[in-house]
Amino acid sequence: MSPTRATLYLVIAAVVLGVGIGSATGLTGKDEYLLGLRVPLEMMQGDHWWVPFIDGAPRLKKPPMLYWAGRASFEAFGPSLVAARAITVAFALLLLGGTAWLGRQLVGQWRTGLVAAAVLLGMSGIASESRRLMLDVPVAALSVAAFCCYLAWTQRPRMLLLIAAAILLSAALLTKGPIAVVACGGGLAALWVTRRETLALLLRRWPAHLAMLALALALPVFWYLDVRSLYGAELAQAAQDELEARQVGLSADALFGIVTLALPWSFVALRGLWSLRHEPHGRFAAIWALLTLLPFLFMRSFDRYLIGSLPALALATAFALEAGAAPPWTRRLGSLPPALLALALIALLWRWQLGGWWLLALVLIGFVFAWWRRAPHPAGLAGSAALLWAAGWGVAFPALGVNAVPAEVVTLARDKPVILFDGPEPALLPILERRALRQTSRLTPPIAPGTLITVRAEDRVALDGQLAALGLHATQRLEYRALTSAGSGIRFARAGATRDDWKRAWTERSPAPLMSTVQVLEVQP
């Protein structure tokens, strides 16, 4: 494939993934607005590089690579949502490129690789997670890139390729630690099982493999040991918190999660894994998918942790499409959840008299036509799926106004100390102010007069109690209402909203019954 053609494909993918990433009302999540955006901002304010900081304390629950990238992007382009989220989009492009290259290597033709990349572009998990500055797409991209370099080395044993694999694996480990081992290690194990010559190479050239492993571990281990010497107690507590959060035990949530992340291709992929299980490339994809999924069957995790399984499923889907092993029911069944989700979003926007629904409606019509016709072309399937997610997450969802911050709040907070109490709300105020701001659920002195405190109405009683205990008094400066994120990206109704509230919102043709009330207080002398 020519460089010009490859560049064109990357530009198209970047446009599809980048639609709407600059919108403050776009898809987000707690890990993004509480950590992903604020940590690099605080690193800039405190001039921290080596160890990330948040709210005045080292952020040690996750490795630092994404926060390093965040600060570097903010330093180069200025703090903004585009500068932040473009990082994840770039890693998504790397993941797409790696998947395309793997398809080419496994089957011997670029067509299969390009189909696999197009399938991956249209999967739910890539469409949503690439739009947020979070860890999961970057660690998957770096892990797959490391595996690609290793596979290239097995075919052309040049030391530079093995060094590149080690560096990429090191970066993946510095992004999300053990998840990199699962994503890259699963691919390596699948390769060694399905291609005996690579296993023989492993045994014959074990010193080179050992050197690669040592190089990959060098910087992560050094960072960990250095941080332990500086912040031993904090690191131990962070590790304990992470272990408790995982809650080890058998769980089927990962099975549901992987089906959700791979929509609308889920059932085509599963059918491909089964029907091509006797083919070498099909067996490789099946083993890789299984090994990247297996650990999460024994612990509590979020669906997005399974992003590393999606390249294997995309490859299986491409193999099935190319072999004619995808019965119509597999794509039609997979198309139903995205279509129903898009239809619900269209209905809300239309009922609440907001813009953006008509574009999504047009794209939805094309999507249903492509996925329900008798003999569709793979390009039509992949393109319509990618466009549906782009129109939904990039255009229609931002039109709901979730996390909208009035301009007067941004103006009032400018150049003043700000505390985001509990929530936090406004969730995107730090990036709009280009400052980390302080977030806490427990006030501690000193709190200077003139400090602004933002709080949801339902948390006002708790805030007033803490202010009284500190001998402080605050008066309300502003109040506004908005739909707000409740942890998950698509949960935007206020805490405690009932079915009756949803009925009222529909009847009144307004989202007001679902909105949270946010108050801005100022501490008095």
Image (cartoon, rainbow, N blue to C red):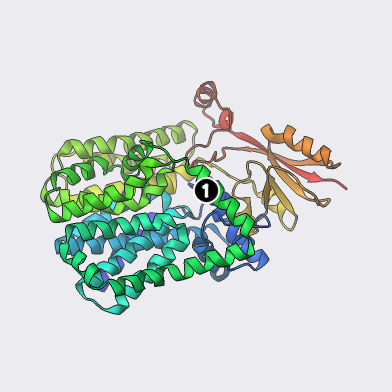
Q: Residue at x 16, y 49 (%)?
A: 321
> Dot 1 corresponds to which residue?
242
Single out the residue that lies furthest toward the top. Answer: 500
Q: Nearer the viewer, residue 69 or 89?
A: 69
> Is residue 15 toward the left or the right of residue 222 in the image?
left
One can see residue 109 in this view: no
One can see residue 343 in this view: yes
> Is residue 258 toward the left or the right of residue 23 in the image?
left
How many labels sit on residues? 1
Q: Secondary structure at mark 1?
A: helix
Q: Nearer the viewer, residue 237 or 524?
A: 237
Report which quarter residue 161 is drawn in: bottom left
Q: Residue at x 56, y 37 (%)?
A: 483
Q: How many C-alpha atoms fall within 10 Å of the one at disc 1: few (<14), some, or many (≥20)? A: few
Report which quarter residue 11 is drawn in: bottom left
Q: Position of residue 219 (x, y in %)?
A: 48, 70
Q: In the rendered view, would you say 357 is above or below 71?
A: above
Single out the residue that lies furthest toward the right. Answer: 525
Q: Quadrant of the N terminus?
A: bottom left
Q: Position of residue 409 (x, y in %)?
A: 69, 48
Report which quarter residue 185 is drawn in: bottom left
Q: Position of residue 236 (x, y in %)?
A: 58, 54
Q: Nearer the viewer, residue 166 or 29?
A: 166
> Is residue 471 toward the left or the right of residue 459 in the image?
right
**As shown in the figure, which amino acid type bears the numbered disc 1?**
Glu
